[in-house]
Image (cartoon, rainbow, N blue to C red):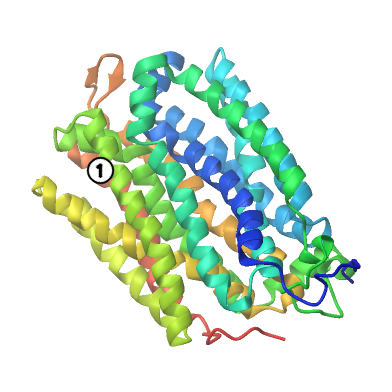
Amino acid sequence: MRQQSVSINADRFPPLTLAWTVWGLGALLYLIGFFQRVAPAVVGDELSRTFDLSAASLGNLSAFYFYSYVAMQIPTGLLADRWGPRRLLSLGALVAAIGTLVFAAAPNGSIAGIGRLLVGGSVAVAFVGMLKLASHWLPLKQYAIASGLALFAGICGAVFAGVPLQMSVAAIGWRQVMVVMAILTGLLSICIWWLVRDDPVERGYLSHAPEHSESSAQLGVWAGLLKVMAYRNTWLLALVPGAVVGCLLTFAGLWGVPFLTSQYGLTPVGAAAVTSTLMVAWALGGPVFGAFSDRIGARKLPYVVGVWVVLIGWLVVVYVPGLPVWLLVAVLVVIGFFSGCMILGFAFAKESVPISLAGTVSGVVNSGVMSGPMLLQPAMGWMLDRMWQGQQQAGVRIYDLPAYQAGFNLMLAWAALAALLILFSRDTHCQQTR
């Protein structure tokens, strides 16, 4: 049962400005997490030179973020239901600040990997924490929109990890940039603890979360998890977005910049601008898909359309070489926008299980989302090294088109599987399972 507060506001819901502010502090941590997620795409050459990394080693260093991120998702969902998002978000921001400092000061790749592990595991609480706050602070009809705006906030972080990061690294160095990020993240931890509350009743308002007689805390950790996994949609909605996000972050988060510089002759800044454009399109697609899904009262149809368009788009990018740059960018914009369909998975999954398990199922789905880049980034690096012809430039390995196509085939295979799996999901028609 939620703790009750006596207040003159106890007969009304919290003002939307306050509700969105509380949610927005969680969104800021998600923004920082996304910045950290895709930064290796821009600083990859610097990391390769600093730590003498091959493609497989660089892919593995980048994926250390995802190893701990994925590992933390199910515990985060369970803890969000048991402890509440305020503790998780403030502690997550603090540990992320520490991990960023470790990464910035790392004398070798192993220590840098430890820093990435700390950052990935700590910012893993951001998305589930935001969703939990949204279910308590915002009206139900705004939940899918909040999920889309969460993606928008994350992509803003990715945009900062594009051209602005490229210019900052050129000006002061990648280590100094990471120190600044650590300081900002530490300050955010303080703000979250000071301002965020788990439920509006702690501020004297009514809560938007429905009352229920059974909670995941009462069920117990494993009982709650097993109950969530008994629903077919849980499995499908974990595997499908792994392909969508895995393809996108394998390209925009690590291998897109070297692909564009070597195969299309773009400068590093120009390539970073293209990958940032892809991420911006993804950011715009999330809220649009969320609002459209709410309007038509369906989750499955827009999700199916989005996944199939994404698959076709990546086939064009990988197997139609030598596209005019403007057309390549246009195709990537379409891919990014329709990749926003994956945000529907969170509302879709939440509606597919009892509301008492909302945090748990969000953690399961988000672990599926991040399993894509976790597996594909190092796998593509491994494939690139296998196909490497021995070319180097300024101490960095150069790969030809067949090598990139062999690597990208791994993500295309997952995308094709996802396009088939989503057809077997059961639509909730935007109605919560009781």
Quarter containing the N terminus: bottom right
Q: Residues within 10 Å of mark 1 (few under 14, many from 20)?
A: many
Furthest toward the front, the residue is 8
The residue nearer to you, when weighing 172 against 25, is 25
Q: Is residue 394 visible?
A: yes
Residue at (34% x, 27% y) in the render:
166
Q: Position of residue 419 (x, y in %)?
A: 38, 71
* Number of marks present in the image shown: 1
Q: Residue drawn 30% across and 14% down?
A: 395
The residue that appears at 50% across and 80% down in the rendered structure is 425
Split into 4 quadrants, where in the image is the C terminus?
bottom right
- Residue 205 vertical position relative to residue 28 in the rendered view, above or below: below
Position of residue 175 measured from the top left corner of the image (x, y, whole percent):
49, 18
Query: Left or right: where does residue 121 sit relative to residue 167?
Result: right
The kind of secondary structure element at disc 1 is helix
Q: Answer yes or no: is residue 399 visible.
A: no
Q: Quadrant of residue 82?
A: bottom right
Q: Position of residue 75 (x, y in %)?
A: 74, 53
Decide: is 263 above or below 220: above
Q: Position of residue 171 (x, y in %)?
A: 36, 16
Q: Residue beneath label 1, please?
A: 274
Residue closer to the observer: 43 or 170: 170
Q: Is residue 26 above or below residue 237?
A: above
Query: As shown in the figure, which amino acid type bears the numbered disc 1?
Result: Val
Horizontal side of residue 118 vs 59, given as left or right: right
Quadrant location of residue 197? bottom right
140 lies left or right of 36: right
